Amino acid sequence: MFLKRLTAYALAAAFLAGCGSAPIAPGAGPAVVPPVPGAAAPGAAGTLPPVIPPALGDPTPTLHNPAPPQRKVKIGLALGGGAARGFAHIGVIKALEANGIMADVVVGTSAGSVVGALYAAGNNAGALQKMAYAMDEAAISDWALPLFGTKSGVLKGVALQSYVNKAVNQRPIEKLKLPFGAVASDLKTGQPILFTRGNTGQAVRASSAVPGVFQPVTIGQRTYVDGGLVAPVPVRFAKEMGAEFIIAVNISTQTEAQAAVSSLEVIMQTFSIMGQRINQYELRDADVVIQPPLGNMASNDFASRARAMQAGEKATLALMPQIKQKLKARRESPAVAVK
């Protein structure tokens, strides 16, 4: 039995020696680690170290698209003509201010030039409302005697000029807090004129000189009448003064809304008919057009000033989402040179 075991051991040793390997004693040497499936053999060329996955709970970075930068946009107010209906402009300004929208440029025609000059002088909506309620129609109505004489108007307009100059503390246009322009018509050539310098009250008087109602205004060698003949809502002039975003306010009477009875109403209705044609082209260049619902309010209805202001505010608030959306888009867009 002993010889059989010895022979078996000898055969096993000879076999191992022929394979070139040495036996490992039980319990001796390092433990064999099985290779990782798919891993390259140790020492193989061009291999990369294994990727170590992040530990559970590691924060994952989140990418956010930054909001586009907003630039300063010059906002222009183009205030149209319409006599007593012009009180609606104050309501428009009130709603804009309440939503943080402040004009940088103000241009007005006729009644719009009156409100525009007072606003450009630094009066906010609250102050304008107080001035509106305190305004005495008689204080700006200086009758020319005899009526319908050789002066081509029943009102001289000097009282309006004095009222405006007093309200702006006798400052000329170029000294007002905001850039301001008043549009009038050259009576001889029919061309528009934009007053941006000089006597504020006189420029407003010229812009408001409705033919047949106010006497024409002579400044220098030229004579001027109401700007509504050439620019009922002065959008293009706001653009000329550098406005990039123009809010236009159209307070003209709709021809079907009001029956003309008095001489003044006939004149103002004529203005409205002409103005509608001009506005078809003028208002296209405005970014937003506000038209207060004034219905059949007459042009000489000063008693309805509160109603007009409320209508202006209501119309502006109704368009506020659109105004803000368009203004935001303009602020995020590249600047375009104003022609």
Image (cartoon, helix red, strand yellow):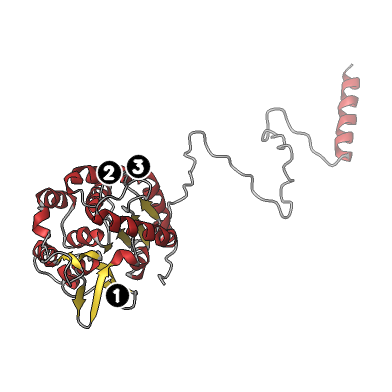
- Residue at horizontal 33%, vertical 66%? 229
**Image quarter in which the C terminus is found:** bottom left
C-alpha gap between disc 1 and disc 2: 32 Å
Please tell me whether mark 3 or mark 1 is closer to you in this view: 1
Residue holding disc 3:
318
C-alpha gap between disc 3 and disc 1: 37 Å
- Residue at horizontal 27%, vertical 43%? 311
Does 313 sit above or below residue 139? above
Q: Disc number at residue 186?
A: 1
Please tell me whether mark 3 or mark 2 is closer to you in this view: 2
Chain-order first, disc 3 or disc 1:
1
- Residue at horizontal 23%, vertical 58%? 111
The answer to which of 317 and 89 lies nearer the viewer is 89
- Looking at the rendered structure, the kind of residue marked 1 is Asp
Q: Is residue 38 left or right of residue 277?
A: right
Residue farthest top in this picture: 1
- Mark 1 surroundings: few (<14), some (14-19) or many (≥20) residues within 10 A: many
The answer to which of 93 and 207 lies nearer the viewer is 207
Residue 128 percent location from the top left of the image: 16, 52
Residue 263 percent location from the top left of the image: 25, 56
Residue holding disc 2:
311
